[in-house]
Image (cartoon, rainbow, N blue to C red):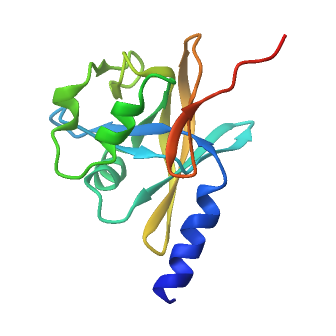
């Protein structure tokens, strides 16, 4: 594929707004890993199953594959800085945010930045090009009242206020 075609694809997809999540996992010693993910979808409600797309070669993907579990932290509208942080390679991401292990599976939960966290047991991983499609069976959910962080046209925004 030509560089221009890839850029056209990137531009096309930037016009499709999406919610923003940080996918997290911890290794056997409890070291947390995570990355920003805007490729997230509900696959089925019965059984509750999510899919996320993670970069092939990322430490997060490798840790998810070894651990067999991951968490999906849905970010609230004030968490754009956290989304940017977890999208930046080579940073000590967890040193800059408030987090703690989840109650169910001990996975990294970004407590100050989420409107929901889903703990998932790894189902399957399918590599497609530069990314892996990771399926997870949802084992536990924690919900909070807040507005979601959105991403589209290469910028973060929040849900528009409803008109009365």
Along the line of sight, which residue is nearer the eye, 65 or 90?
Answer: 90
Q: Is residue 57 left or right of residue 77?
A: left
Is there any visible trace of residue 76 in the rendered image?
yes
Quadrant into which the C terminus falls: top right
Residue placed at 51% from the left, 24% from the top?
77
Q: Which image quarter: residue 138?
A: top right
Along the line of sight, which residue is nearer the eye, 23 or 49?
Answer: 23
**Numbered circles on residues, count:** 0
x, y percent for residue 50: 60, 42
Q: Is residue 44 left or right of residue 75?
A: right
The correct choice, above or below, for 54 with respect to 17 in the image is below
Along the line of sight, which residue is nearer the eye, 55 or 14?
Answer: 14
The correct choice, above or below, for 8 with respect to 53 in the image is below
Residue placed at 41% from the left, 37% from the top?
22
Specify the farthest residue to the bottom: 2
x, y percent for residue 96: 20, 27
Specify the farthest residue to the front: 163
Is there any visible trace of residue 34 in the rendered image?
no
Residue placed at 36% from the left, 53% from the top?
65
x, y percent for residue 126: 51, 65
Residue placed at 35% from the left, 41% from the top?
84
x, y percent for residue 52: 52, 49
Along the line of sight, which residue is nearer the eye, 27 or 39?
Answer: 39
């Amino acid at each position: 594929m030509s560089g221009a075609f890839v850029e056209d694809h990137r531009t096309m997809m930037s016009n499709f707004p999406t919610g923003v999540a940080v996918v997290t996992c911890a290794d056997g010693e409890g070291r947390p890993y995570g990355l920003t993910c805007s490729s997230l979808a509900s696959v089925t409600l019965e059984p509750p199953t999510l899919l996320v797309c993670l970069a092939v070669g990322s430490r997060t993907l490798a840790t998810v594959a070894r651990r067999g579990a991951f968490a999906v932290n849905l970010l609230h509208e004030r968490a754009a800085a956290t989304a940017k942080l977890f999208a930046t390679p080579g940073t000590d991401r967890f040193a800059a945010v408030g987090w703690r292990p989840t109650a169910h599976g001990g996975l990294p939960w970004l407590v100050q930045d989420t409107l929901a966290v889903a703990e998932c047991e790894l189902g399957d991983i399918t590599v497609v090009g530069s990314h892996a499609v990771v399926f997870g069976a949802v084992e536990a959910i924690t919900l909070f009242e807040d507005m979601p962080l959105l991403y589209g046209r290469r910028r973060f925004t929040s849900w528009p206020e409803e008109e009365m």
